Amino acid sequence: MSDIKRLIKHLGSDLAAESSLSAVISPSAMRFIFAAVIDGGASDIELGALVAMCASIQSHRNTEMFSEILLGLSEAIRERSMPISCARYGYSSVVIPNYGESNRGSAIPLIAIKLQRMGIRVLVHGALETAGGLANCGVFRELGVLPVTTRGQAERRLAEDGLALVPTSLISPGLAAMMALKARLGVSTPAHVLADMLMPVLTEPAQTLHVLNIPMWLNALADTESMVMQTPALFSSSIDMTGCKFGSLDSRPQLKYRVGLDAQLRGGNSDGRSIEDAYGWQTLFQEEMESRTDIVSFAGRDPLKTSHTRWVATAVPTDPRGLAAWTRQRLDANVALPQPVVNQLACCLYGAGYADDFNQAKAMAAVETGSLAA
């Protein structure tokens, strides 16, 4: 009996899933199994059963089991990945995941281009097959940013233009292939969760800030060295990761920051907001699930030069062309951004070393976006 079949055999009942599975699944065992899957060593039946098992564990939010699955998959993927090289130039580069199941776009194109214009290099990685990734790619395309087709092109774009849109398939073909299974099987795979935690840029310590989206029920993974390498990271977490993750336009996820293993935590608790925990994470913002509305000024006047501003319920376009126009207007004109976007931009400025402390980063983000505060 194959190792995949042996594992699947323990899923014959709910009792097996709750009792004996914990003794069978380990990160090393899952690494071996996922390696076989990625390398084409599993039949369609085995593959379908394995994905169904993982989906069942995820739906029950069994933290221990699903964490071990992700740790095993992470190791298998890392062994077969081709990271992008990015030399430091001034500030740390920011790496942003572009995934999601929502068919509407997000603020990722806006944040990425804003950072680029401020002299911070940005790499956006994503699977074009996911609904959210496809929507944002459409916005990027309308704004003149096209996906790269080779790793060399990605590195040149970063060095010369300061912004690269990189398909997941260039970094990890195995991960992209597993994500593409959803079209065949109709359910998400562990790869969809892992993709948001991918750290695809290879640099010296403290030269890259990776943005990571981790569901709140899997928060413990953020403190697992084998999953989240000891490099600078901006950790975005929410109870509802389908609608509130990094790049959200109308709500703000919890945002934490951690410097690399060999660096000292900057800022401490001096700003009254940042809290350092036992693992070196600073809580920059708590989650805010209340939907926000866009700020616009009366008669098109600059919100920085007049107090005549108000909250109005304006709908953000959901189609790529409409969202691109909305984004371009906020990039080129002094039109204030939704507060959650300003908050997320401030976190990137702080993590990239653009500001010396978080209060300064918030002030810079407010000025750059024409907002009253960050």
Image: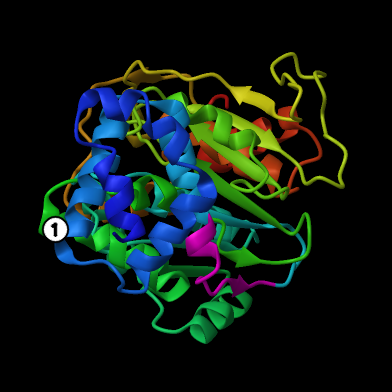
Q: Nearer the viewer, residue 161 or 371?
A: 161
Residue 199 magenta-highlighted: no
* Lateral position of residue 307 relative to residue 239, left or right: right
Please say whether residue 288 is visible from this viewpoint.
Answer: yes
Q: Nearer the viewer, residue 231 or 102?
A: 231
Residue 249, position as x, y percentages in the image:
35, 35
Q: Nearer the viewer, residue 305 or 88?
A: 88
Q: Residues within 10 Å of mark 1 (few under 14, many from 20)?
A: few
**Quarter of the figure that contains the C terminus:** top right
| Colouring style | rainbow
Residue 242, position as x, y percentages in the image:
29, 34
Residue for point 56% across, 61% down: 116
Residue for point 58% across, 79% down: 155
Residue 172 is drawn in which quadrant? bottom left
Label 1 is placed on what type of residue? Ala
Task: Examine the rendered structure and indicate whether residue 138 appears above or below residue 190.
Answer: below
Residue 46, position as x, y percentages in the image:
21, 58
* Lateral position of residue 41 relative to residue 257, left or right: left
Please say whether residue 336 is visible from this viewpoint.
Answer: no
* Lateral position of residue 39 relative to residue 224, left or right: left
Residue 178, position as x, y percentages in the image:
30, 61
Task: Examine the rendered structure and indicate whether residue 183 appears above or below residue 307.
Answer: below
Residue 84 magenta-highlighted: yes
Q: Which residues are magenta?
A: 75-86
Residue for point 42% across, 75% down: 170
Name the element at disc 1: helix
- Residue picked out by circle 1: 183
**Quarter of the figure that contains the N terminus:** bottom left
Residue 137 is drawn in which quadrant? bottom left
